[in-house]
Amino acid sequence: MTDLDEGSMTFDYARYLAAKTTVDDRALNRHVLAGLRRLMPAGTPRVLEVGAGLGTMVARLMDWGAVGAGEYILLDADRQLLDDSRRWLRDWAAARGLRSDLRPDGLQVGDLRVRLVHAELGEYLEAAQGAQGEPADLVIANAVLDLVDVPAVLPGLLRLLIPGGVYWFTINYDGESIFAPAHPHDDLVMRAYHRDMDERVRYGRPAGESRTGRRLFHHLRDAGAPALAAGSSDWVVSAGPDGNYPDDEAYFVRCILSTIQNALRSREDRVKPADLADWLAVRARQLAAGELVYIAHQLDFAGRSPG
Ligand SMILES: C[S@@+](CC[C@H](N)C(=O)[O-])C[C@H]1O[C@@H](n2cnc3c(N)ncnc32)[C@H](O)[C@@H]1O
């Protein structure tokens, strides 16, 4: 399972996204990233990242030398997260000796102007249709497209790009979660959780699909923007030889377990409460002992907008 949404949480979502950073750092597919670098226009690009959360991707892309100047828009439906992103990005910049200055609509980080846009994606795309907004050179969605109705959203998202502009859609969940060692209720729990993902509604719209990754190949082709690079970006989290998980990754896995619990606690028709409680208790004990391995299968894509 992946891409926790905030509808039902009992944990600190900003901390979850910060903890996810090192997991994503390892997972992001380097072949697809190399494709993105090849496709990127020269000069100072205008980047739009949808569902940007805390803004960890802009920091990563600066660290990796993929973005350094120009404009980078962080769009998210969660105002609190966008507010948090100012502080998170300032702390990140300070730790690297990079100058940052707050601005009314975001902040300046080195030569990059970061703008914060508070909007629900579907509403934003509807408003953008026919409007004369400045198009983007690059659109990014990281751990987001499995939280929205892709066939409904994708054409509008691609229309935000200049003709031939570039997309990078990463960490798209693809229907496989592995918790090791195996537990007799694994299949039952994950089947029920995937069903919950498939039926989820947020902001009054269908919100997610448990096999988004594999379906994106065809959705992108149908939208006239077939993938030019694709590859897996699985999350793999395990403890080191000392039994400790790296960085804040134990918290990351705890959030994953909480989300499964939240999604299934009222679905007694799908998983009996005693079975769910047993599964969660065993997983929590294994996590505390540094024995739990968590793997989620995901896919990354890069390509060009139609035209
Ligand atoms: C799993 S988080 C990923 C955040 C960030 N991209 C990252 O990888 O750290 C999903 C983000 O998408 C945002 N989101 C979910 N549905 C959205 C929608 N319909 N419109 C705008 N933002 C949305 C959430 O608020 C959240 O910040």
Image (tube, rainbow, N blue to C red):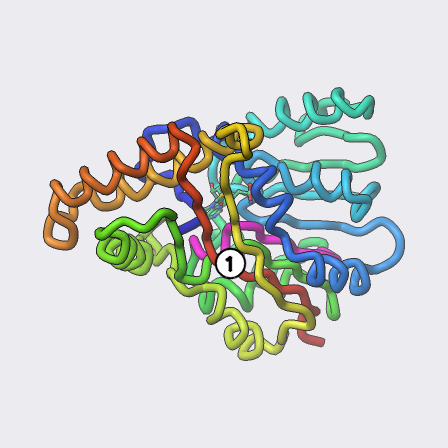
Quarter where residue 210 is shown: bottom left
SS at circle 1? strand
Image position of 199 with respect to 265: above or below: below
Q: How many marks are shown on the rendered structure?
A: 1
The range drawn in magenta is: 136-147
Give coordinates of residue 275: x percent, y percent. 15, 45
Image position of 40 with respect to 68: above or below: below
Image position of 150 with respect to 280: above or below: below
Give coordinates of residue 71: x percent, y percent. 76, 43
Left or right side of 303 for 65: right
Q: Is residue 135 visible?
A: no
Give coordinates of residue 90: x percent, y percent. 69, 23
Kindly identify which residue carries mark 1: 298
Q: What residue do we see at 79% from left, 48% from top?
A: 66
**In the image, the residue with mark 1 has its CB under 8 Å from the nearest atom of ligand 1:** no
Give coordinates of residue 254: x percent, y percent. 39, 33
- Which amino acid type corresponds to the residue marked 1 in the rendered image? Gln
